[in-house]
Amino acid sequence: MNADAPLETSTLHDLHGRWPQAESVEDFQRNLAAVRDRIAAACRRVDRDPAGVRLLPVSKTKTEASIRLCYAAGCRLFGENKPQEAYRKWAAMADLPDLRWSVIGHLQTNKAKLVARCATEFQALDSLRVAEALERRLQAEGRGLDVLVQVNTSGEAAKYGLPPDELAPFLRKLPAFSALRVRGFMTLALLSAEAVRVRRCFRLLRRLRDRLRQDVPDGIVLDELSMGMSGDYEIAIEEGATIIRVGQAIFGARNTPDTHYWPGF
Ligand SMILES: *Cc1c(COP(=O)(O)O)cnc(C)c1O
């Protein structure tokens, strides 16, 4: 493809709430293969190596039985929005020793203990209070945690995440927390069918990363860009995503309304 041609990839938000349920290992294998094909196609459009995109299946609201099927289809790391739900599933599936959990939703300080105990990754760091609470709990557990800083790229007041202009001073404070291994940024784009507006959020996150990476504090790494979900991951990949968080396109639509997990919808 001509590198100068504009990318016209659409969102898949029209499928929101309508993705078919995966009910067998074969269903999961097929859904995973379909997502991986789309990842590969998006990478080709912008000349990227698909190995640079990590697919994180998001299992929120899904049952233990469903997650075990997805595990049987080869997945080992799952994303959960709520700390309590992640903790409950972690405890229930402790018989699978190589199963790992990534908490991708807002954390209140009184739940830091759950994340410190059950998660290997936390993608929604957005305040020093949470950093302090996690550090204390991780020290007590003798563990470390990979962390992404959540950024509000859509400017919506109800969205979690730091506003772009608060990122630099925030990053400068993070080396004090030795149990937190800062790896990059996470964002939720505008939930809009308008691809141009969605793309703008992803592009902003990448530009912020590229700029802040030039003067990054010691011990902080800004390699990861976690952006894109079932309805918009192809656009996110075109804009540089290294992690995409995909729920419905792998597991099927959720019964619980998104307002339960995302403020402002
Ligand atoms: C639920 C969720 C996702 C995945 O959304 P899908 O539409 O199911 O792909 C991604 N990121 C976060 C933070 C979520 O809570």
Image: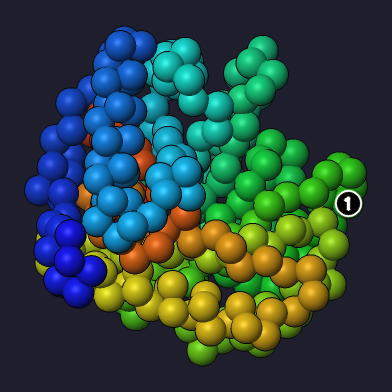
Name the image quarter holding the C terminus. bottom left
Which colour scheme appears in the figure? rainbow
**Residue 41 as seen in the image, left or right of residue 151:** left
Q: Residue at x 79, y 49 (%)?
A: 144
Q: Is residue 258 visible?
A: no
Q: In the displayed structure, would residue 170 be above or below residue 76?
A: below
Quadrant including the N terminus: bottom left
Q: Position of residue 228 (x, y in %)?
A: 34, 55
Residue visible at 56% across and 46% down in the picture: 103
* Placement of 115 over or under 213, stated as above or below: above
User: Residue at left 55%, top 27%?
Assistant: 76
Q: Which residue is mark 1?
A: 139
**75 relative to 250 in the view: left or right:** right
Horizontal side of residue 128 vs 203, given as left or right: right
Q: Is residue 114 above or below residue 201?
A: above
Task: Tell me where residue 251 appears, x and y as whole percent.
Answer: 32, 28
Residue occupying the far front of the picture: 2
Kind of element beneath mark 1: helix
Tell me how many marks there are: 1
User: Residue 232 or 151: which is nearer the viewer?
Assistant: 232
Residue 2 seen in this snapshot: yes
**Ligand 1 within 8 Å of the CB at mark 1:** no
Residue 110, position as x, y percentages in the image:
68, 54
Q: Nearer the viewer, residue 9 or 81?
A: 9
Please rate how many residues cluster around mark 1, counting C-alpha atoms within 10 Å: few if below 14, some from 14 to 19, many from 20: some
**Residue 246 or 264: which is nearer the viewer?**
246
The amino acid sitting under disc 1 is Gln
Q: Is residue 78 above or below residue 179?
A: above
Residue displayed at 66% across by 22% down: 98
| Residue 6, percent from left and from top | 15, 71
